[in-house]
Amino acid sequence: MTEREVIVEADGGSRGNPGPAGYGAAVYAADHVRVLAERREFIGIATNNVAEYRGLIAGLEAAAELGAQIVTVRMDSKLVVEQMSGRWKVKHEAMIPLADRARRLVAGFERVSFTWIPRAENKHADRLANEAMDDGALVDEVRTAREAEKPTAAPVLEAVAAQPAPGWTGATGRPTRLLLLRHGQTELSVQRRYSGRGNPPLTDLGREQAARAAKMLAAKGDISAVLTSPLSRARDTAEAAATALDAPLTVMDGLIETDFGEWEGLSFLEAAERDPELHARWLGDPSLPAPGGESFDQVRARVDAVRRDLVGLYPGANLVVVSHVTPIKTLLQLALGVGPSLLYRLHLDLASMSIAEFYPDGGSSVRLVNDTSYL
């Protein structure tokens, strides 16, 4: 779905200033009625202004993903509106990189305007920000429990986590590093058929691929946990890795593959022949679900929720995430900050490894894509 003109409403808050903070952003169509996208995230301890900038950035990123060219930003933060309009200077050290990041996003649109609105007119974004802050209590509760159970980290893990951000990202802090492992081969993957919520087992080659990936990961070490989709082809791949690493294994429903509905088990050609018009539109419209199934936009929403949980629950940790083509591509899409075209253009081999990093300040990077050198 492409929208040339959109309205972004964003907000952020902190319970303590600084304190537990979160942001929210809503993207509307130009009619200011249809909600096209929502974003929210708990960001840890931060100030109101930092959270507001994070909300602005999330809203601009969502607008870019929708293909917008003309953006009207409405916020109840006088500071952010005046600074982004160029009338006030950004002086606070924590906000300088966030303002720069927002300006880089602005430069990618044809036109962006900033308007201050009263808080009463920013209720949607304010609600999302408060929901994000509410999430923080759960994140802190689970994190405290995990810290109590966790053994002392090995010195080598400290060295890995302390590495600087790659390239020109400008991100700060230690990232949560996701080692994204696609499951091994199944009969449906051999036949190149849509394989979503069906549960075909690994083939003999698939089990061998899982074993080789596990051996590679064990040699790498310094991995805190293994997270997996609930489907058996992913769980069996993940169990091999968890056993080799002697790491805890957790099933996360949000990592499940796309529900292809009535196209499940069909080949590309069979689905195209069955529903020619729908299939052609589906290939270019992430908001359109397969018949009786799930859209890529819906996949993105649940995978982004998993990403937020992992960053909150495992700060600075290295994690193995075993999943399927669409969730892994979606995590790479989120890390790169690009639109849905990546879903249709990126190829991922069976049992391949990709690496995405997500930083506590909201930055992200991709270090590796589709590595199969260990197979």
Image (cartoon, rainbow, N blue to C red):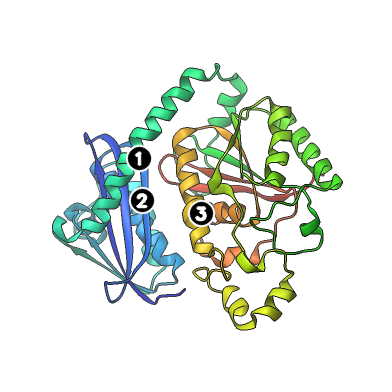
Q: Is residue 349 left or right of residue 49?
A: right
The residue identified by callout 1 is 135
Please tell me which residue lies in front, 357 or 192. Answer: 192
| Depicted 238 relative to depicted 77: above or below | above
Secondary structure type for disc 2: strand
Residue at position x 79%, y 45% from top? Answer: 373
Q: Amino acid at mark 1?
A: Asp
Please tell me which residue lies in front, 36 or 13. Answer: 36
Q: Position of residue 245 (x, y in %)?
A: 69, 27
What is the residue that sits farthest to the bottom in this orientation?
277
Closer to us: mark 3 or mark 1?
1
Q: Position of residue 254 (x, y in %)?
A: 53, 48
| Depicted 83 relative to depicted 133: above or below | below
Secondary structure type for disc 1: helix
Q: Quadrant of the C terminus?
A: top right
The residue identified by callout 2 is 40
The residue identified by callout 3 is 334
Tags 3 and 1 in contact by the CB under 8 Å rule?
A: no
Q: Earlier in the sequence, mark 2 or mark 3?
A: 2
Closer to us: mark 2 or mark 1?
1
Please tell me which residue lies in front, 63 or 233. Answer: 233
Closer to us: mark 2 or mark 3?
2
Q: Amino acid at mark 2?
A: Arg
Residue at position x 64%, y 55% from top? Answer: 197
